[in-house]
Amino acid sequence: MIVESNTVRFDAIALDGGATLAPVDVAYETYGALNAAKTNAILILHAFSGDAHAAGIRHETGKPGWWDNMIGPGKAFDTNQYFIICSNVLGGCRGTTGPSSINPATGCPYAMGFPVITIGDMVRLQGMLIDWFGIERLLSVSGGSMGGMQALEWAVAYPERVVSAIPIACTTRHSAQQIAFNEVGRQAIMADPDWNEGNYYSGNPPARGLAVARMVGHITYMSDDSMREKFGRRLRGKENFTFAFDDVDFEVESYLRYRGSQFVNRFDANSYLYITKAMDYFDLTNGHGSLAAALGRTEARFLVISFSSDWLYPSYQSQEIVRALRARNCDVAYVELQSNYGHDSFLVDVAEQTDLVRGFLASTFEKAR
Amino acid sequence: MIVESNTVRFDAIALDGGATLAPVDVAYETYGALNAAKTNAILILHAFSGDAHAAGIRHETGKPGWWDNMIGPGKAFDTNQYFIICSNVLGGCRGTTGPSSINPATGCPYAMGFPVITIGDMVRLQGMLIDWFGIERLLSVSGGSMGGMQALEWAVAYPERVVSAIPIACTTRHSAQQIAFNEVGRQAIMADPDWNEGNYYSGNPPARGLAVARMVGHITYMSDDSMREKFGRRLRGKENFTFAFDDVDFEVESYLRYRGSQFVNRFDANSYLYITKAMDYFDLTNGHGSLAAALGRTEARFLVISFSSDWLYPSYQSQEIVRALRARNCDVAYVELQSNYGHDSFLVDVAEQTDLVRGFLASTFEKAR
C-alpha cells in the first residue's frame, strides 16, 4: 500500500485560548475508499510524536506508517471496508500548522509567538477537515495515548458526529506525575542555550535538550519488565566496565542516546513544548462539572483498552472512563490487555487489540446501517 | 542534639578500577557514645545525595540531619544505647574526597580526572574509618537506597565485621530502568555547555543541566499517589491556565523547578556523574557467581525493608535479597511496609520502620553480648 500525504488549507481557526490562527494547514493521509453514503469513515488520531502517516508505505521515504500493523487490508482498521483518515495535529511539525510554520504577519516562523493550543483546538481543526470531506458522522474515532484523549474530546465536543470511539491507553486528564514528566521534558529543552527562547530556526536547534527530553519519554513508554528483557544489564560491545565517562557501558545507555539523537532529526522542539502543554491542560470535565456529565452528552458506543504494564497511562485511568460511561448507561466495553511492553503496547503488541477492534467495528458498522 | 562534622585524612586508598587515590579525606559525624568494649557501633550509610549529617542540629547551619527522625535519644537508632557513625561517601561533595577536591598533583580540582569509583570503594574507605575508631565489629550497618547497597556490600566484603545489616528500599544491582534514569541525569548534566567537560570550578556550574537531572530524580522518589495527594492538578496561585510559557501553571511544575534549582546550591554536578556510575556498576554477585554465593559469606542477621509504593526500588528487588539469604539459611526478617510515599518512604514515613529497627537492634545487641 503506497500512500502519499496531502495538505488542505483553511482560512482560519478560532482557538480555546482566545487567539485566531489564519491561515491553517492540515496534513493528512487517507486509506481505503469512502462509500457513497459516507458512513464508513474512521478518524485515526496520533499520539504525541506521531504524524499523518499512520499506515502504508510512503512513496518518497519507503517508511511504513506508525500504526501500519493496525491499518490496512484485512487488518483491525480494514481498508477493504472502511475509509481511514489520519491528520497531523495542530501545533505539530509534520505538515500541519505549528510553531515552526511561517507566521504570515512577520514572514518568519511563529516560534514562541504561536498561540497556546488545546486538545479541543486539535479536534476542532479535525472537524473542519471532516467537513471538507463532506462527512457528517464518523463511524469511529480512535487512537492511543494523546490520540485517545482526542477520541474522548471528539465524543464530548461533537456527540452528534461520532458513532463510536476507541480510546486506548489514555486518560481524561493528566495526573501530577504525567504533568511532571512533561515538565521535565520542557525544562530540558528550555535549558538548552540553543533553544534561544524558541528562536533557533535560522541556527542550530536545541538538539541536546530535545534528546534528553526524548530519553525521559522513552523510559516512560517502556515497562521495567520490557527494559529488563530488551537490555538487562548487558554491556555494549564489551566484557567489562570502562571505568570511564567517554564511552558507553550499558546497552540501555546506548539505546537511549541513539533514540534521543534520532528524534532531533524528525521533531521540532517548540512543537514539543506546545503539544505537551495541550496534553497537560486537557481535562474532559472542564465546563461540564463532572466526567459523567461530560460523557453523558455522547450516544457513541465505546471500546476502552488499557495495558497491564502501562505505568505512564495506568489502567485505573481507563477504568475511570468506563465507570463514568456506565454511570450514564452508555454502551461501553472495556478490556485490560496483558502485555509487557508498557505504554508502547498499543503500538507494538497488537494481536489481541486487533481482534477487539475488528469485532467492535464490525458490530458498530452493522448497527449503523 | 547539637552536632558537628569532623574530617580524618588517610594516606591513600586503592580503588577497584585500579587507581590509587592519595590522600583521601573522610567527613563524618558521630552521635551517642562508644562503649568500653566497642560493641555498640552502628554505621549509617547515606543515599545518593545525602551526607555525613544524618542526625541532630548542625551548629553552624541549624539544619537537622537527613535521618534525624530515625537517629537520636529514644529513636530507632537510639543514641542512649548505640554509637552511631555516618560518613560522606567517597566521590561525594560534602567533605569526603571527590571530583571537586583538589588534586595534589595539579593543585586544581580533580574534575573528570577523578578515578571512577565503586560502591566497594566507598565501603573500603568506611572500613578505614572504622579501623581508625579502633572498632572491630559493627553491631549494624544500615541505610536506604544507595545506603542499603552499601550495607549489602559491607556484609559481603567484610563478613567478619558485621553483626547485622538493615538494607532498606534497595537492590543488589540496578535494573535497566534504574540505569536508564541515572543515564538521563548524566546526559542532562553533560548536555549543559557550562559543564565544560567537567571543568567548571572556576566558572559557573552546569546549573540548568543539574536541575533537570534532579527534577527527574524527584519524580522517581515520589509515587503517582503521593504526587496526586500533594499536588493533583492544582494551579499555582491562579484560577485559570496562563495560556503562556513564561509563567508556571501547575503546582507540581513549580515544585519541581524549585527543588531542581535548590539542589544546585548543595551538590556538585561531577559528583552526580561519579556516584550514579558507582550505583549502576554495583552488582553484589560480581566475583561470587550467584547472589546466594555472595550472601553465603555473611553470618550477619538481616532486617530487609521495602515499601509498597516504591517503584524506583520495587519490593521484588528486596525480595530477591531475602530469597538468597533464606537459601543460605541466614537469619533474615523481611517486611514490606504499606506507604504512599514511594521511594521517599524510608525518609519520611518512619513510624513502623522505627518499631522494626528498634526491635531488631535490641535483639541483635542482646544476642551479641
Image (cartoon, coloured by chain):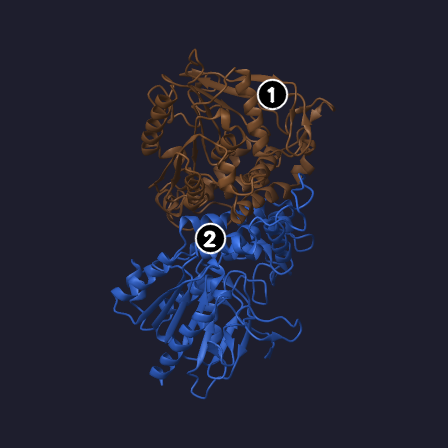
Chain colours: A blue, B brown
Q: Mark 1 or 2 closer to N-term?
A: 1
Q: Are marks 1 and 2 in contact (CB under 8 Å)?
A: no
SS class, disc 2: loop
Residue placed furthest toward the right: B106
Q: Amino acid at mark 2?
A: Phe
Question: In percent of the image, x 25 and y 69: which residue is there?
Answer: A329
Q: Is residue B251 visible?
A: no
Of residues B42 and B113, the one nearer the viewer is: B42
- Looking at the rendered image, the quarter that the N terminus of chain B falls into is top left
- Image vertical order of residue B254 relative to residue B8, above or below: below
Mark 2 is surrounded, within 10 Å at the Cα level, by few (under 14), some (14 to 19) or many (20 or more) other residues, namely some
The residue singled out by tag 2 in the image is: B243
Residue A36 position by quadrant: bottom left
Instruction: Report which residue position mark 1 lands on.
Output: B25
Chain containing mark 2: B
User: Taking the image as drawn, is residue B102 in sight?
Assistant: yes
Left or right: A308, with B10 as reference point: left
Question: Splitting the image into 4 quarters, where does residue A240 fall?
Answer: top right
Judge by depth and name the residue closer to the eye, A19 or A209: A209
Q: Chain of mark 1?
A: B
Judged left or right of residue A227, residue B226 is left
Q: Amino acid at mark 1?
A: Asp
Q: Secondary structure at mark 1?
A: strand
Report how far apart the C-alphas of labels 1 and 2 lie in the structure. Answer: 52 Å
Residue B104 spot, x, y in % from top left: 71, 21
Q: Position of residue B308 (x, y in %)?
A: 37, 44
Tally of numbered tags: 2
